[in-house]
Amino acid sequence: MRTVVFDLDGTLVDTSGDLIAAANACFRARGLADLLDPVADAAVAFQGGRAMLRLGFGRAGVPEALAEDDYPKLLDHYARHLCVQSRPYPGAGAAVEALRAAGFATAICTNKPEWHARRLLDELGLLGLFGALIGADTLPVRKPDPAPYRAAVAAAGGVVARSFLVGDTITDRETARNAGVASVLVTFGPEGRAITRLEPEALLDYYAELPELAERLLPI
C-alpha cells in the first residue's frame, strides 16, 4: 500500500502559539518576563521544548543548563494547555481524507511525545484520519533516526519503498534521507519558501496540491 507519513508540529498543525506559551510560563515561574515571541520565534517552537528554553534563558543571561531542569515543567504546562491556540493548517484534513479515498495509507511520525500528539489530534478531530502514530517516546530513538519513520509506515500497513514524508524542518529532511524515501517540505511554516535550501524532492505550497503530488511521487 502506498503510504504518506506526516510530521505534526509545523506540518499538519500550527502549534507554535501553545508551545511558546508553555516556555513563557516556565520563564515567568522563575521571575523572568515572557522571553519568546509567538510570531517572531515560531520557528524555534518546532525545534522542541529544550530549544525554546535554551533560547529564552540565553536572552536573559541565565545559564542555559536550566533548560533541562525546566523541561518537565514545560511538558506539564503544555499538557494542560495544548489546544488553546493550535489549529490545523488550511486544507490539511481535507487533503488527508482525499489521500485515503484514493487508496493511500496515512500515518504520523513526530518528535512530540506520543500522548501529547494523540490528545492534540483527538481534540482537533483529526486522529481518526491516521492509521498509525509514532511519537518521540514510542521507540528508544526519534527522528532523524529512520526507525520511527519505518515503524509508522509498517503500523499503517505500508512498505517503506512505497512511501514518502511530509514535513517542515531539517529533521524531517534528514529522516527521509536516512530512510531512503522522498521528502516533501511545506512552505507555509515559519521559514516560508526559504525551506528550499534543504533541497527536498518536492515542496508543498497548499494542502490542496498534496493528492496530485502524491500520485506523481508514488504512481500506481
Image: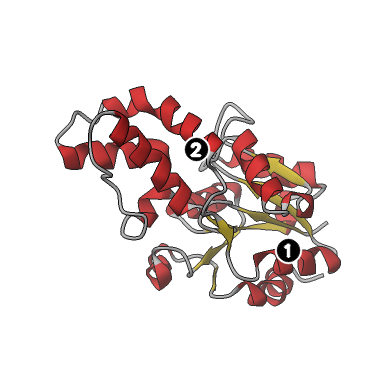
Residue at mark 2 to residue at mark 1: CA–CA distance:
26 Å
N-term-proximal mark, 2 vs 1:
2
**In which quadrant of the rendered image does the N terminus lie?**
bottom right
Can you tell which mark lies on residue 78? 2
Can you tell which mark lies on residue 96? 1
Q: In the picture provided, is 55 more to the left or to the right than 167?
A: left
* Element assignment for label 2: helix
The amino acid on which the numbered mark 1 sits, given as a three-letter code, is: Val
Viewer-proximal residue, 32 or 103? 32
Can you tell which mark lies on residue 113? none
Of labels 2 and 1, the one closer to you: 2
Residue 160 in the image, given as x and y percentages of width and height: 71, 50
Q: In the picture provided, is 150 more to the left or to the right than 38?
A: right
Picture residue at 77% right of the left edge, 55% below the top: 129
The amino acid on which the numbered mark 2 sits, given as a three-letter code, is: Tyr
Residue 118 in the image, given as x and y percentages of width and height: 67, 41
Considering every residue shown, the one lying at the far left of the view is 61
Task: Please determine whether, in this image, residue 130 is positioned above or below residue 215.
Answer: above
* Element assignment for label 1: helix
Viewer-proximal residue, 133 or 142? 133
Considering every residue shown, the one lying at the far top of the view is 69
Residue 27 in the image, given as x and y percentages of width and height: 29, 35
Q: Evaluate whether residue 111 shows in this view.
A: yes
Picture residue at 54% right of the left edge, 67% below the top: 201
**Label 2 crowd bin: few (<14), some (14–19), many (20+), radius 10 Å:** many
**In which quadrant of the rendered image does the C terminus lie?**
bottom right
Residue 157 in the image, given as x and y percentages of width and height: 82, 47
Viewer-proximal residue, 134 or 38? 38
Q: Evaluate whether residue 51 shows in this view.
A: no
